[in-house]
Amino acid sequence: MKIAIAGAGLSGRLLAFVLSSQGHQVSVFDPAPSMSSPVAAGWTAAGMLSPVAELESGDENVFQLGKRSLDLWANLVPRLSLPVELHFKGSLLVAHRGDEGAADRLVSLLRAKAPEHDQPQPLPRQELARLEPSIQGPSHTWLLANEGQIHTVQAMQALAASALNVQWHWNRPVTLLTPHTIHTGTEKHTFDWVFDTRGVGARDKPMHNHAELSCQNVRGVRGEIFWVQAPGVSLHRPIRLLHPRYRVYIVPRAPDTIVVGASEIESEDRSPVSVRTTVELLAAAHSILPEIAEGRIIHSEVNLRPALADNFPRIETEPGLTRINGLFRHGWLIAPAMVENALKSVFSADFSLLQV
């Protein structure tokens, strides 16, 4: 088939890799100037693969998509032409003394929603010291054993490099998208099928009904991260600091980088990270990892996650067109399973990414 993909973010690159591997003729259109330009939200994410932790804001569907995607990532990453850091060592929930109320509410919520074998497990201090000797300060810790992490920048690069014989049309924003057809400015391109994975860019017109569930009725949710180079810090799994006012995640990246970020901010502001955010996030990270004080801030970044009115992902398919949107803060967690389900709606109900 002759297939077009609008948007070269995470979902677009997954589609390009899978469809080109099947022998389809694939063209990708994106407004970014090049393959390595960090424009899409997928570049900015920390890459936590946390189906249980995301039950805080997700539903059973998001949980099942996440569990399926863990298997898909384990199958996809070894097939990529560039190395990608992927680990399944679990993740940690931590809380300071005085924040027990907020922590207990979240842990109770996760225990009510998660299956028995995925339950948060209290971690004694001696065991925490053995697993993560650099963590100091929290009085309460829980282990989510069946979770992981992926290096998002490596994966974005590897997915594009591994999508062989794909025509990449950079600096080509899609101005109109209809079944079988993509318009870029005055040019019209016709295909057997079109996939729309533009995220916030799929909002072709102003929103009039903010409650409407549609892949085109999308808003941006601001996310902010820092990269801290900290050679002396030993960290092996992601951490979520539970706080009454905000959530902070701390994620290790080889060889010596720590990613610090905030989960979500209801704003479409793309301006640089504020002083307040900088102080709060890095102070929170320092309260868990004191050794990070000697690290160096080597990068900060802001991006917009695409979210629909209910904050849940959505696939819409009609003859000649499939839209994928609303992955919100769950992008890296659920994208492989979302792509798999989208391809099932086009090709066959028994389609599997494990068999590509």
Image: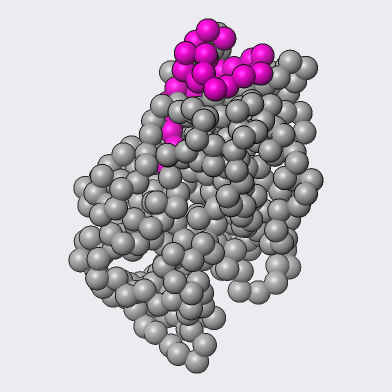
Residue found 37% across the figure and 42% down from its top: 85
Expressed as whole percent of the image width and height from the top left, the position of residue 202 reads 56, 68
- Indicate whether 157 appears above or below 54: below
* In the image, farthest residue toward the bottom: 186
Residue 138 belongs to magenta span: yes
Q: Position of residue 118 (x, y in %)?
A: 46, 22
Can you give x and y, in whole percent of width and height, for residue 40 in the image?
52, 61
Q: Can residue 198 be seen from the camera position used here?
A: yes
**What residue do we see at 51% from left, 62% from top?**
38
Q: Nearer the viewer, residue 41 or 279?
A: 279
Residue positioned 59% across, 17% down in the render: 141
* Residue 207 position by quadrant: bottom right
Task: Please give left or right for residue 38 compared with residue 248 in the image.
Answer: left
Q: Vertical placement of 140 versus 268: above or below?
A: above
280 horizontally vs 22: left or right: right
Splitting the image into 4 quarters, where does residue 304 fall?
Answer: bottom right
Q: Is residue 189 magenta?
A: no
Quarter placement of the N terminus: bottom left
Query: Residue at 57% across / 68% down in the picture?
Result: 201
Whole-percent x, y for residue 285 in the image:
65, 33
Looking at the picture, tell me which residue is in the foreground, 127 or 203.
127
Is 147 placed left or right of 228 in the picture?
A: left
- Whether residue 338 is visible, yes or no, is no
State which region is magenta.
125-150
Looking at the picture, tell me which residue is in the foreground, 231 or 144: 231
* Colour mode of the rendering: one colour
Q: 101 above or below 54? A: above
For this rendering, which residue is in front, 312 or 160? Answer: 160
